Amino acid sequence: MAHPLFEKHRATLDAAVEAIHNRGYWTPYPEMPSPKVYGETALADGKAAVEALAGRDFALDQPGTSGWAAPEKSPYGVKLDVRYPVCEVEALIAAAQAAMPGWRRIGAEGRAGVCLEILDRLNKKSFEIAHAVMYTTGQGWMMAFQAGGPHAQDRGLEAVAYAWDEQRRIPATSVWEKPQGKNPALKMQKHYEIVGRGVALVIGCGTFPTWNTYPGLFAALATGNPVIVKPHGNAVLPAAITVKIAREVLAEAGLDPNLVSLAVVEKRAATQALATHPAVKSIDFTGGNVFGQWLLDHARQAQVYAELAGVNNVVIESTNEYKAMLRNLAFTLSLYSGQMCTTTQAILVPAGGIATDQGHKSFDEVAADLGAAITKFLSDVNVATAVLGAIQSEATLARIEECQSGEYGKVVLASTKIAHPEFPAAEVRTPVLLACDAADEASYMEERFGPIAFVVKVADGAEAVRLSERIVREHGALTVGVYSTRADVIEAMTEATLAAGVALSINLTGGVFVNQSAAFSDYHGVGMNPAANASYSDAAFVANRFRVVQRRYHVE
Amino acid sequence: MAHPLFEKHRATLDAAVEAIHNRGYWTPYPEMPSPKVYGETALADGKAAVEALAGRDFALDQPGTSGWAAPEKSPYGVKLDVRYPVCEVEALIAAAQAAMPGWRRIGAEGRAGVCLEILDRLNKKSFEIAHAVMYTTGQGWMMAFQAGGPHAQDRGLEAVAYAWDEQRRIPATSVWEKPQGKNPALKMQKHYEIVGRGVALVIGCGTFPTWNTYPGLFAALATGNPVIVKPHGNAVLPAAITVKIAREVLAEAGLDPNLVSLAVVEKRAATQALATHPAVKSIDFTGGNVFGQWLLDHARQAQVYAELAGVNNVVIESTNEYKAMLRNLAFTLSLYSGQMCTTTQAILVPAGGIATDQGHKSFDEVAADLGAAITKFLSDVNVATAVLGAIQSEATLARIEECQSGEYGKVVLASTKIAHPEFPAAEVRTPVLLACDAADEASYMEERFGPIAFVVKVADGAEAVRLSERIVREHGALTVGVYSTRADVIEAMTEATLAAGVALSINLTGGVFVNQSAAFSDYHGVGMNPAANASYSDAAFVANRFRVVQRRYHVE
């Protein structure tokens, strides 16, 4: 008898498993916020639901609640003041551990079914989650809906599909019968039980509180582990809504809701205590290098899956679609003000310029034309605010100012502040584009998170490929792109990215951008260079989160 | 066009993949040293081949050879003096790295085919390897043949099967086509390439130089990584023969033989330099806790798969096959003088004794009867020497003496030295059996490698189960057993082993022993307690050894 939630969602799960093997386009969660799909009142309902949470206690009924905290400050200036329960670390961990045997006993099918039910409920709440993501992160509305809703759900489902695909191949039992020549065979009954490694901690980031949280959350949960979600202090609400839905589904299924809990902590020391707790066996982390490295160095009891900083780069060697290339890059640099872990930071262009369908373009022309393309793309304030969103942190605002100074390169395009028609307090900024020499490594060869990009002058195309590979090896990258009309350059770039371990986008001039990664098809991150030690998702992302414990005995 | 070696071995590979999923009994490598299978002259040929190596240079044609070393001393007193090339660490690593792209390019099928060809050649050389294992480790002949030959080959094939099973599900290409409503779909061609993580180091142990080396060797190799095998200084020959065969197969297949090399190092510092080299991305280690922990602490650039020390234990709560139980345990304690990572060390027996089919037996009776069963089992010198083999190291000889002193418990059965009819210099020792209280944790609760076991007096059956779980959690174990006629005790033991993460053998009274682990069926180690952080084999053992690097571009 399969678990009823497994039966309910089996078709979706089977399709997801097929999708991760075929890696074509697929999703069960429509990315268009259409009233026909999500309901006529979904938009208004979602907005109202989030606004109704403002200024109130966000009840989660978790153990060890010792107080309440309201740490969020909206980049749009929206008043939130949602108060979240602050819970004792030991209480959350004890409750998570107590919930584990029941979660083990319902088996891989039951766990997959429950995870898919959670994802289905999350999908139905996509408009509420979208507003929560938008208000807390500064993302534009459409991005908040898509990346925060359906695309994040896709990434969660993808992790469940990998987890299921690994677990389903482990038989519950076997009969082992070894011939003994003329004597009776040795015959044993064996049982194989899938056991989660222990409490999982998922530490979210301030910019993608669901997209970067769901892979770890669902990978750990589906493989038998209780999960404590520790959101970024400025993006708690999307995680809190997620945890609440998960707890509801678990309770309705007769399971312990403490399998998923929210850890709102007020001090870094509390996060550190949580991360180094002996019971915590895995940590999924998205964020900066300093804390990421601290985790890798100190949380030695846990398997750490880390997505850190990098220096994403694009080589422009030549193109036969100059304008489309510039438009494509302008969008990439503008989207969410470059506050994506996948946004291009360094654009490597030969000193002698490039061949294009518009004739030869000098280095300076390429830089200037890219700046002009950004300006043109953002000339409509409605387009600009929708695409740029708002700047999420004070640190990013300060970084923009710092880069405007000219200290790190010639300012090709200065960042400007745009007044948001709907949110007057929103900090909206256009990208700053700098030009520098390849030798100015201190300028462009460290992550400068936000709407900051460098056009870097390199000797020639071959040198650009070599530099790109070195940047990836030494500083990491989640994305690399190349523009070239020459097969040998594409081939060299392919070899360079295979050697350094980074995903390559070739000649993107249409509606796909180097900073986008599609679930079920694109391996986000790779997990082979300093920017990330794991990928969303692959077998390695799930296989180490559980073990098989066996028992055996003789049978006749 | 599939690789010819893939085609040649495809049926075996398919059967191996089926075996890891069904986990019944299966092997392509017959464990009986039958002339009908291995050839009428195989035994004599294998022995002669090993004896012909004695006193000579073992040529491997490796890069960076700076000298020769002959570190082995046979526990049987057999004169070996085989001289192995000592190679510069940097030269081995540079050669391994240079060999990697070609190994990547032949793909998962080609790699699986080459690995199966190597295993097939190893199988044909089983008698030679058996003698090499026997002479270097002190194993008895039959064990050296089976564990050193076919069973080790099974474990290697099992790892290849897992590696292939993970890689085959990654498509080489996909077409991603995303509908855009009324507009033309976005369409991209994507390529997915499997890339090994980097140079793999496999550090062998002195007792099972093939069985514990092949899983890591073949898991790393099949997933695209060059492998440097660093054998234990006293058991180089079996590894050297293995490496030589692998290099021959690689060269014949037109591949770089430096994909597999042998590192004979004369100082621990050289091993440390190798292990912490930035190019080394994975380490498989079998051995003691001190160096194992050093690796985990210092070789941070690599994924370390470690099998360390533990305190294997058996709970005896009751039995209805008293004599068969004692015979079974006597064999376990005697086999290879307990020099197995799976040998039972602590036998937990209630202070009030146990119920048996022979009536109630007091604690002292159980201990004495077990001692008597060992003595009886080893009363025939031919049986004794065949089963016990020789003591592999001076340290184990010293440990036996230390335990004879009575310092760690009452001596129930003293170890005796047996004269080997064939090898007069062989150090053959019978097991020492001690009795102590559960409170004497310093005695029995650390690994005392070798033919040393403790009968530990615990309050009752429930306490025995609790103590077993705590031993596993705190000190680790690869094997745990239980004897009981009560369903509730079996159930409690099952829960305890699921919680602590250790394989359980229940009421073994026949021809299977707690210290035996069968490839394709038994998960050796689990990887969830301090004795091992990985298992032979499961998806986790292979999935993290490679990554998928993709590239994508628009197509019409």
Image: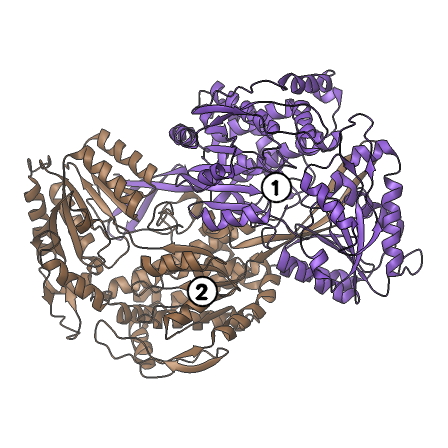
Chain colours: A purple, B brown
Q: Residue at x 37, y 70 (%)?
A: B268
Q: Residue at x 51, y 75 (%)?
A: B91
Secondary structure beneath disc 2?
Answer: helix
- Residue at the disc numbered 2: B275
In the rendered structure, the answer to whether residue A216 lies left or right of residue A198 reads right
In the rendered structure, the answer to whether residue B495 lies left or right of residue A273 reads left
- Residue at the disc numbered 1: A20
Looking at this view, name the residue that lies furthest to the right.
A359
Q: Position of residue A315 (x, y in %)?
A: 77, 57
Q: Quadrant of residue A496?
A: bottom right
Would residue B28 be seen by someone viewing this image from the given angle?
A: no
Secondary structure beneath disc 1?
Answer: helix
* Quadrant occupied by the N terminus of chain B: bottom right
Nearer the observer: mark 2 or 1; the answer is 2
Q: Are marks 2 and 1 on the same chain?
A: no
Alpha carbons under labels 2 and 1: distance apart:
35 Å
